[in-house]
Amino acid sequence: MKAKARVLVMGYGVIGKRVADAVSLQDDMSLVGVSDVSSDWRIKMAMKKGYPIYAATTEALSKMRTAGIPVQGTAEDLLKQGAVDLIVDATPKDIGARNKEGLYKKYGVKAIFQGGEKANIADVSFVAQRNYEKALGKQFVRVVSCNTTAISRVVGGLHEAFGIKKARVTLVRRAVDVWESHESGVMNTVVPETKIPSHQGEDAKTVVEGLNIISIALKGSHNLYHLHTGYLEFNSPIKVEEALEALMKEPRVVLVRSSDGVMGLNSLVEIGRDLGRPRGDIFEVPVWSDLMKAEGNELYLMWATGNESIVIPENIDAIRAMMLLEEDSRKSIEKTDKSLGITKSLY
């Protein structure tokens, strides 16, 4: 067991920059640097924060230096020195798999991958409140996507509490990340994904054991947050009050009400800003408590998913589990939540 884990963040994008900030807040972790291939404003923001910067490739090294970025070498240089215990790989889809074979295995370093990679890249697909113990001491862990994380928190929590016979979840996904909105996305339409079931439900099965779930996904013409609707059939009759009580016990799940003016995803964006958190991030999964209905064994509900932020605490807990900094999931979750200001009530 190490007193402090030395962490390198590979990829300083939407997830990577948030993970770097979160690692910097932990008293049992130290951020040894961030690594990327870009020379634009994103990595220059890391400069302003004083983070040590490393080029992800030798090709990027000269470009970054030409752009005036005080790059300290390559990520591989750092690994050669034995200065890293664990890498959080937040690079675009498929690059993490190449990094695993070309770097992480070569230098025997632990690594966390994100949900864009296939499940077989790692020993465990991870959501802290569902399977923290399975990640203890592992070399490779995959933090699942924002949508799968939300499903695992909400549907997984209800499954553990009552036993779900069948879950059917529909996802209305944001079309594109905010910073890429000038390049791609959809406008004035909704585009169905071409495969049923969509991958999120199948992915949730790698986290929540014994969950019978099918998901359908659609891409909406917006760039912040996803909206999920769930039809859940339980093994026995369920009451709304019972479901709400179970969700209130779930870490990183909060209840909101349309009667309080939380009318849509735009309301949650504004709440995140008003909370005064960095970037207006909401790490919790907001569930509409007054838009929930139960009939016999069936429950219908809706929840929102902050695509930029909800996997950040999962990455921090995964570091703690892999490095054996804390073997009790509840203690790690509490520690992470306190450092990030995660709460059981947004307002």
Image (tube, rainbow, N blue to C red):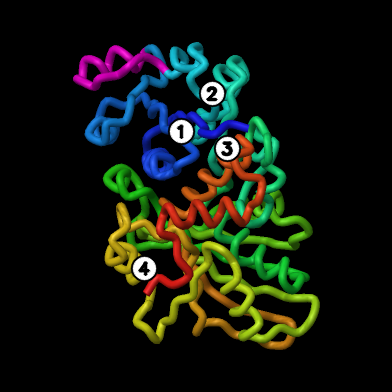
Q: Earlier in the sequence, mark 4 or mark 1?
A: 1
Q: Is residue 100 above or below residue 129?
A: above
Q: Is residue 187 above or below residue 286?
A: above
Q: Earlier in the sequence, mark 3 or mark 2?
A: 2
Q: Is residue 73 magenta?
A: yes
Q: Nearer the viewer, residue 101 or 280?
A: 280
Which image quadrant: the N terminus? top right
Q: Label 4 belongs to which residue? A: 268
Residue 129 x %, y %:
63, 56
Q: CA distance from mark 2 to mark 1?
A: 9 Å
- Sort mark 4 into few (<14), some (14-19) or many (20+) by Cα contacts within 10 Å: many
Residue 179 x %, y %:
30, 45
Q: Earlier in the sequence, mark 2 or mark 1?
A: 1
Q: Which amino acid type corresponds to the residue marked 1 in the rendered image?
A: Thr
Q: Which amino acid type corresponds to the residue marked 3 in the rendered image?
A: Glu
Q: Label 3 belongs to which residue? A: 117
Highlighted range, magenta: 59-74
- Sort mark 2 into few (<14), some (14-19) or many (20+) by Cα contacts within 10 Å: some
Q: Residue furthest front?
A: 3
Q: Label 1 belongs to which residue? A: 91
Q: Which amino acid type corresponds to the residue marked 4 in the rendered image?
A: Leu
